[in-house]
Structure formats: C-alpha cells, structure tokens
Image (tube, helix red, strand yellow):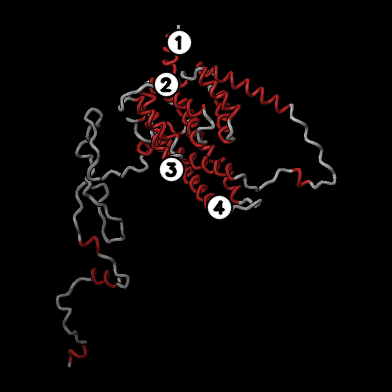
Amino acid sequence: MKRFVRTWTARSSSSDSGTEHREDSPEAMIRAELEAFCESSANGASQGAEVVHLPKIVDAAESSPEAAKEAALRIRKYLADPAGTSNSAQYNAIMLMRILADNPGATFTRNFDAKFVSTIKSLLRTGRDLHVQGYIRQYLDILEQQHSWDENLKLLLAMWAKEKTKTSRGLNKSPPIPPRSYNMPASVSRPQRNALPSPEELAARIEEARNSAKLLTQFVQSTPPAELEGNDLVKEFLDRCQTGARLIQGFIHANNPPPDEDTLLTLIETNDEISVAISRQQRAMLKARKLAGSASPSSNVNSPSPMAASGANSPAPALSAPAPVPAAVAPAPPPPSTRPDPAVVELPNTVMTGGRLPGGTSRYEYNAEEFQVRNPFADDYETESQSTRPQDPHTDRVRFQPAEQGR
C-alpha cells in the first residue's frame, strides 16, 4: 500500500512539473515561448519584445492538444504563487490565458479543471497586486457575459458567481459613511481629482498601457483584413488603449502633486505609443473597408458596368469606319438610282443670273455664267435700245448736212 501511494505521488508530481519533450515538439516550443513571454520584463527585455512570442504560442496550441494542455499548466503555475511571481509575469499569464481561450478555444479551455479553478480562486482572495486583481476580475466578467455557453467554463464561472456574491455582501456590510458636517468644506468630502497615484500603481498603469499598445499593433498586423472588423481581441485591446490614453492624459495634467520631469517624459512617451497604435488600427480598418467595398459579387463579373451601358464614357464611332452589322439583321441595300452620292455637295442658292434646273440628278458641273453678278451701275435701257437698233455698216462715217453738200 505504501508503495502504491509513493508511486501515485510520484506520478502526480511528475505530471505537475511536466514531462520532458523533444526540443522540436510543440510542447517544448510552447513551454519555452510561454516562459519568454511571461518573464520578458524580469529578463530585462525591451518594452514590447514579448509580442514576438505570441504567434508561436498560438500556432503551437492550435497544432497540438498536448501543447494547449502544457500552456494551461504553465499559466496555472504562474498564478499559483503570487508571492514568488512578479506582477508583470502574472499579468502576462492572464493576458495569455485570455488569448488562448479565444484561439484555439475549446482545446485550451478543456484544461480548466478543479486545480485551475482553485488557483484562480486563491488569486482572487490572496492576490496582493490590485492591478492583477482588477485584470482577472474584468476577464471573468467577460467570460460570464460572452462565453457562458461553454461547457468547459462551468466550474470557473460557478466559482466566480460565488465570489461575486461574497464580495457584494461584504460591501453591503461596510460601515456607512458619516454625514458631512456643515462646517466642513465641500471639497474635503469629494474625491481628489488630478492626483497622481502611488509610484507602484503608476508604474503598473504605464506598463499596462504600453503592453496594450504593443499587443494592439501586433494583432492588427497579424489579422487578415477580412477578419479585422469582427476580431474580439482587436476590439478588446482597442478599448484598453482608449481607456489607458484617458488615464495617462489625466496623469500628465495632474497637479496634486504634479509629476516630475522624468515621470512626465515617460507619460508623454507612453501616450504617444498609444496614439500610434490606435492610429494604425484605424488605418487598417479603413483599408479593410475599402477592400470589402471594392470587391464585387460574382454575378456582376460578366455584366457590363453602368457607365459602359449608358455610353457616357464611350467614344463616338468614326464616320469612315462604321461598326459592322450582322448579315442576318442587315437591311437590304437601296437601288443605285435612289441612293444619294456622298461625294455630291450642294451649294447654297445665291442670286445669280442663271440657275440650275431643279430636280436634276446629274453631277454638278461648273458654269462660269452662273456666277456672273449683275452690275448695279449698268444702263439697261441704253443697252436694250442699242441692241434693238439696226446696225448700219457705215455708222462710223461722218454725215454732212444738205447745205454743206451744195457748196
């Protein structure tokens, strides 16, 4: 019996610590990448360096259910020891838990067993970092609202419902706030605005804002344009960036006490990082909407466009080269006698001495007499009288009177 107990204890401890896997296996890869992601701040890595590990973690969890189980085990270990784990590592572990719950989804959430739920419950009760507490509570609320249908989350959501009930009872039993004295100024009872939090909380807020900006940029770059608008992670981190931007701007304008020069510079740089991340997300959304609007349905591929159908932009056909008409629908040509000749040019009817006979069908021939214009200064009467008078062949001779002839 003792041997059986020792064997069972050894197996359970080995299952908790994890078995050895090949270096190229998905289990070994997800263990190394998850450790690098959660402990990036403790290892002195630059801000946002942990983002490069996310695609490898998600790919490994999708490719192997054992790798997803290994990820759940490692996340539980980071959350099981709040005293021995840094706040940034716990925060990153919760963030990774949130990402893997959506992708691959059920392959990961099926590992939320009683040990995992007990670890989350202990973190809610004994966690010392308020930032981590608020983040895990926010995530549990989202799971309760959006993933209540998931059978793998029943234990976790049942525990969270009980914890919320206890918390609400504790708040209801809190001592009432004494009424404000009339001699006390009203500004004392109001919460102080434009005040900086404690250095620990301020550092946690700045770190959260920077991580949210880096993760939003990473998700925008790794998400296809067609899936960008409906991606829950992009929406979530966009909301977090907008909330963080409001908090950081409030800290920048704080005057009770005002931030020192180094803190103010850090706040301004953090605000710039958030603004850049939000701007990139908005540009990506605009580009995705343009691509979705330019894509036409398959039924309209072979149909002519309205511009082409209306002929608004189509060039006018040349007169010398008309479009050919099919023989089946072409009309019979008119007889040659009634067919007008395109080379005949009809001149305008002007006032002339002569004219053309109407109804002529022959080609026009040039006649100089038709273009003789009557002289307005000509003496028509004298011309007519001379034309009617008989011509005397001796008219050019000099005539003498009879008196002169007798001389």
Whole-percent x and y of residue 405? Answer: 17, 89
For disc 4, the neighbor class at 10 Å (few under 14, some 14 to 19, many from 20) is: some
Question: Residue at the right extreme?
Answer: 182
For disc 2, the neighbor class at 10 Å (few under 14, some 14 to 19, many from 20) is: some
Q: Does 10 sit above or below residue 394?
A: above
Q: Amino acid at mark 1?
A: Val
Question: Residue at the front extreme?
Answer: 2
Q: Amino acid at mark 2?
A: Lys
Q: Which mark is residue 69?
A: 2
On the image, numbered disc 4 is attached to which residue? 264
**Disc 4 and disc 3: Cα gap in Å?**
22 Å
What quarter of the picture does the N terminus occupy? top left
Specify whether residue 17 is in view.
yes
Whichever of callouts 3 and 1 sits on the residue coming sooner in the sequence is 1
Q: Using residue 249 as the reference point, say whether residue 291 is left or right of it.
A: left
On the image, numbered disc 3 is attached to which residue? 44
